[in-house]
Amino acid sequence: MKAAVIVFPGSNCDRDMEVALTEAAGQPALRVWHKDSELPEGLDVVAIPGGFSFGDYLRCGAIGARSPIMNSVVKFAERGGLVLGVCNGFQVLTETGLLPGALMMNAGLKFVCRDVHLRVETTESPFTSAYGNGGVIRVPVAHHEGNYITDDETLAVLRGEDRIAFTYCQPDGSHGGNPNGAMADIAGILSPNRRILGMMPHPERLSDSALGGTDGKLLFRSLLDTPVPA
Amino acid sequence: MSVKEPEVNQSLAADHGLKPDEYQRILDLLGRTPSFTELGIFSAMWNEHCSYKSSKIHLRTLPTTGPQVICGPGENAGVVDIGDGQAVVFKMESHNHPSYIEPYQGAATGVGGILRDVFTMGARPIAAMNALSFGAPEHPKTRSLVSGVVSGIGGYGNCFGVPTVGGEVRFHRAYNGNCLVNAFAAGLADADKIFYSAASGVGMPVVYLGAKTGRDGVGGATMASAEFDETLEEKRPTVQVGDPFTEKRLLEACLELMASGAVISIQDMGAAGLTCSAVEMGDKGSLGVELDLDAVPCREEAMTAYEMMLSESQERMLMVLRPEKEAEAKAIFDKWDLDFAIVGHTIAEDRFLVRHGGEVKADLPLKALSGTAPEYDRPWEPTPAAAVLADVPEIDVAEALKALIASPNLCSRRWVWEQYDNTVMADTVIRPGSDAAVVRVHGTEKGLAFTSDVTPRYCKANPVEGGKQAVAEAYRNLSATGAKPLATTDNLNFGNPEKPEIMGQFVGCIQGIGEACRALDMPIVSGNVSLYNETDGKAILPTPTIGAVGLLDSLDHVIPMAPRDGDILVLIGQSNGHLGQSALLAEMFGREDGDAPPVDLRAEAKAGELVRGFKAEGLISAAHDLSDGGLAVAATEMALASGTGVEIAADADLGDAAWFFGEDQGRYLLACLAGSVDRMMAAAQAAQTSLRRVGSVGGDAITLGGATVPLAEIRDLHEGGFARMMGER
Amino acid sequence: MKARVFVTLKNGVLDPQGQAIAHALGSLGFDGVNDVRQGKMIEIDLDAADKAAAEETLSAMCEKLLANTVIENYRIEVL
Amino acid sequence: MKARVFVTLKNGVLDPQGQAIAHALGSLGFDGVNDVRQGKMIEIDLDAADKAAAEETLSAMCEKLLANTVIENYRIEVL
Ligand SMILES: Nc1ncnc2c1ncn2[C@@H]1O[C@H](COP(=O)(O)OP(=O)(O)O)[C@@H](O)[C@H]1O
Ligand SMILES: [Mg+2]
């Protein structure tokens, strides 16, 4: 699996993502600078990391989404390439229009950093297949704008097409534990072709037993068993 | 354009905070009246903040060396060897006054400043802490200060991308008019790739990098001399606003520059940025510096030389670069879209020459600027011995425990640390909420432990013992996580040093800190002094914050705080039931009387070694140090961490208050299997240290002698305490 | 030429900040606050041939960057 | 009664947001942007006897909460 991490000024989870992808892929993930206009050849996965691209000034992800490199990321996605956006990466993906909706300020108005529990809502995706038959996982969130919203029609479509990948829940999987007020407890969603995932929680931060958890690892593992697009 | 400058005289000097004798010293030094800009430069170099004129002679008594120390105080941050060719670089610094004026920006720029101190040395920041002191919870200003300061610290650190993993929060009416915001940062570097501020080589370009210069923070004195200035509103001193995004780019650009070999020396621009940084680089390198202010990137119109030399604009660096590397350097600045300009060069003579608009604005002997800075041995009175403790009334143990655990000073700080990203960089092994935080040394199996401690109540009652205790508690917090204490940074917050009794607190605390750092082999490698923390003549409690760093050779040595169901609890260290200045008296009875608990430094060292030894032999499953609230609070915190109840038996000799809530030092509560107790007992005896079995882990209640409280009730009180204080529930 | 761009949340889009402000005003003793919405005001100084040209440029700026038209409306005001 | 409060950074106070926006507009090909400052627009619907009363209440709100007068100025507009 050949993976690349997009690096914006202000990205600060780029190294964490690089480590997780390299670990999963068994070959070093590449770093791609936002001012580049072309992605490297032969990529399987492009990851947009967490952080505060361009300080998250104006709107989080807004300026990053308009960087030169994003045009080729969009083309890559249209060719069926795998794109993972975590935290600020999710915000960037909604700003580019690759994913629907928007991420508003947390309902509590405070930055929130804590472990949350997620229900794996679908294993029918290149990112969640390794989670077997769903279940509950634990990973950290760390964000100020993770409050997902979209219009009712879009929400219906996301549900109808089984494109909600993760929802916040209690440790036992029951309703609750939503850290930011996100609509329908949405923590992560998929694109129509299911090959783009945007999520607020950080799987790359809990992929190592030394850090107290490995639930994030399976997400990267899933990518390995995914056939490359034709 | 040149604004008409005010006439320099005695009274303008006074407006600049220079005492008559200090002004005379300047006249003698120059043999002439200084120019307006020169006066500004002197005032910046000679103020307490830059010159440490009241504290220097006492700071010199602190231990600052040791085999582990690569660079002690004097540079931007201390550098300590952690083996395998790597070093940890750290420092703590206060931003008290700005935070009181504008909590969000004041705290944010405090974090920015300390991060700069660390990466200026060539280290990538890997951990941050913040020690906060606020006024009484019910004081009208307190809540807004707390929320502003906490969101400011988070707003800056989270965006920059450093995990904020520890700190302290305390409330006391003595801080009603002066809150304290002490920010700590630590970074990681290769031991042979540390960068220093000493310039070298004549004719080398002096390069300005980072944000543009504005009138930020300029002008208390210019205000006072308003007559020379028609456009007052424009010149009005402004609060510094932090820009973490620029700081992050500055970090990456600086590390790339350093890797490229272009950097000869580097200094960040803090207070009076351009002045202090340029003088420091020249002074350390025994060179002169010539600056051309026309080249300085400015954010505002018509800035004068005076304003540029005194501006406190953030996110700026000054460097001396290798001329042959200029192109390479420029490429890096451009990559990160950072302003950069050659603003001068080094010269052979001992001279600080500042030009602006074709005029010489300052021409001073550079060495003398820092070399002849005034230094005072201020008169001081030792703090009188505390009166003996009046009788302590009988207490209801359950009620006392509930009151303490829910109080703003002892409840959970989750409300605070959840607003800080404490897992970014994916190396945080022990997060906030334990004794010390542990961050993995990236790419290795080693860990660094961080803690921040001081008990101002103790320091007030007995500065010497209080100073010792702050270091001892830091030593304990590190040891309780299994780390070997390495070195220390101190942030000394006190009132007005011109008052002998305040100076006495300062001198006493330093004496205690020095003794403890020697005895526990935790040399002071960096620090910061904040004096004049007074309002209407009311001083803060003496608050010498101790930030300490420990090393774990392997993450297997990490000791958790959460015991296992069925564990035995043993107490290590002598219990005499010391209640003077205890949290029990303060929180339950509003009493702050009696003496501070004495600290036996030899016993501290032994106890710490025993705890680490027990872990190495696999004898213990958990550990927690005893501090505020004594045995009762420590046992409760362990229970909360594990989600299992604990039971502690009453003591035959000591009364309940003394046994459960006494604050004798040098103690840890350890959890182990019944089978381990005998071996631990033997080891403790060999070390002449008391170790006794005091209870067990199990059930779903906290049981202290005859008193029992359900764990669920305790958890709600403990977890909800902070939000309740903030009026959120 | 000086201009102002006002960016506001579309009707129906929840505004946590606005609500928080309304709540805070209430607890400060300001009664009769029925609704609060928080938006942005972006002041721009730009070179433009004339008002019309400026307005054109500004709306292009809004469409391309200044507003997220999924959730936000914008209004332009050239001074 | 509907009103608007405009909160802007005082002159000379650094505006990182405005700078970032200006820079972004530049790289999107919008030339001739000389300066950008970002401020807040707070729309308030409140009960008030008359315009004067509303203005009085609003400035009290600004002093107490809406503006951070250490670094911000405010302007009130009752519609
Ligand atoms: N301002 C803060 N930021 C982050 N963590 C904090 C802060 N204040 C306290 N903590 C954390 O809360 C826990 C308890 O703090 P404290 O009561 O000072 O512990 P101790 O008594 O062991 O020194 C520690 O893990 C500490 O790091
Ligand atoms: Mg502590």
Image (cartoon, coloured by chain):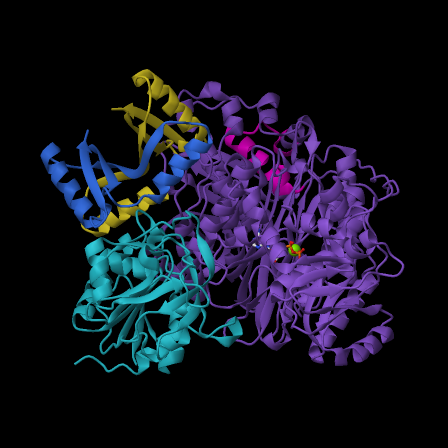
Chain colours: A cyan, B purple, C blue, D yellow
Foreground pick, B434 / A50: B434
Foreground pick, B572 / B121: B572
Q: How many marks?
A: 0
Quarter of the image with the N terminus of chain B is top left
Is A9 placed left or right of B702 in the picture? left
Compared to B381, does B474 lie above or below?
below
Residue B75 in sight: no
Secondary structure, magenta segment, majority class: helix
Residue B277, image x, y percentages: 52, 47
Quarter-wise, where is residue A138 in the image?
bottom left
Compared to B249, does A4 lie above or below?
below
Point out the quarter of the image occupied by ligand 2: bottom right
Residue C18, image x, y percentages: 35, 39
Please give the range of residues in magenta: B27-52
Is B42 placed left or right of C34 in the picture? right
Tell me, yes or no, whether the highlighted magenta stretch contains residue B29.
yes
Residue B493, image x, y percentages: 67, 43
Tell me, yes or no, whether the highlighted magenta stretch contains residue B211.
no
Residue B389 in sight: yes
At horizontal 50% and vertical 53% (from top left) the residue drawn is B116
Quarter-wise, where is residue B139 in the image?
top right
Residue B562, image x, y percentages: 63, 68
At horizontal 47% and vertical 67% (from top left) the residue drawn is B426
